[in-house]
Amino acid sequence: MSVKVTTSTLMKMKQEGKKITALTAYDYPFAGIVDSAGIDIILVGDSLGMVVQGKETTLPVTMDEMIYHTSLVTRACTYSMVVGDMPFMSYHGSLDTAVENAGRFLKEAGASAVKLEGGADVCPVITAIARAGVPVQAHIGLTPQSVHQMGGFKVQRDEDRLIRDAKDVEAAGAFSVVLEGIPSPIAAKITEALSIPTIGIGAGAGCDGQILVLHDMLGINDRFLPKFVKKYADIAAVAREGLEAYIKEVREGSFPSENYEYK
């Protein structure tokens, strides 16, 4: 774990059958922990709207907020490839605006790539951004920015459309594609059909890699968790235990003891 992960690294991992690890992160302390653990990709997701800001969807997150959080993460990373998530309406207007916003992630925040949601409909955007020298990670299947259009967070089962979208974003110039909320057999077919890596979230073990939201898999988020989330730790419980001990000691006067006082 010495050389920073790049798009070439990820392509080689797919070719060699080595699984890619990815997680979200939104700030310097957690990004440092994730990076030092050896996670290949850190996505600064617009999921920060729900995870960090407490909002109901990702839609209200702004470009400036994404640039700010991405800059915190990149400052902590020496190994992981940092991908900035393009928020709702940051690439839906003119191609010039989309390219400009994508470029901000590299120029202002120090990211190595950007991610954007959509299939065939966003291929012109992917091509324009990639041609400007910004690597693009695509995202198909369940796309949270389209939650209202989809009628909620629903598993996507249209195999023909999903395979077509995957091939289209690859042809448009994406270096990888996130597959979200897709039945495992379909995701495995997509992975087999593409030369670029697939990163699954709720898409089964047949993908080239996996991503989860950090706060979900570490047990920090106490809200509803989707079926695909495995909780690897319960940081919220550990934190509450420490907080309750602190409250008890302050109230009974045992903290601070002499060991924590200046003489």
Image (spheres, helix red, strand yellow):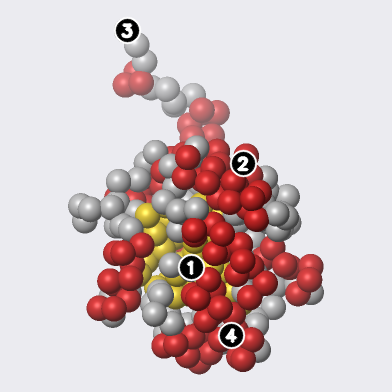
Q: Which mark is residue 65?
A: 2
SS at mark 3 in the image: loop
Spatial CA distance of label 1 from label 3 is 62 Å
- Point out residue 155 in the picture as x, y percentages from the top left corner: 65, 81
Tell me the residue that label 3 is attached to: 263
Q: Residue at x 59, y 46 (%)?
A: 100
Tell me the residue that label 4 is attached to: 164
SS at mark 2 in the image: helix
- Point out residue 220 in the picture as x, y percentages from the top left corner: 53, 54
Number of other residues with Cα within 10 Å of mark 3, as a class: few under 14, some 14 to 19, many 20 or more: few
Spatial CA distance of label 2 from label 3 is 44 Å
Rendered position, 172 above or below 194? above
Number of other residues with Cα within 10 Å of mark 1, as a class: few under 14, some 14 to 19, many 20 or more: many
In the image, taking residue 25 as reference, residue 122 lies left or right, namely right
Q: Residue at x 49, y 64 (%)?
A: 137
Mark 1–mark 3 contact, CB under 8 Å?
no
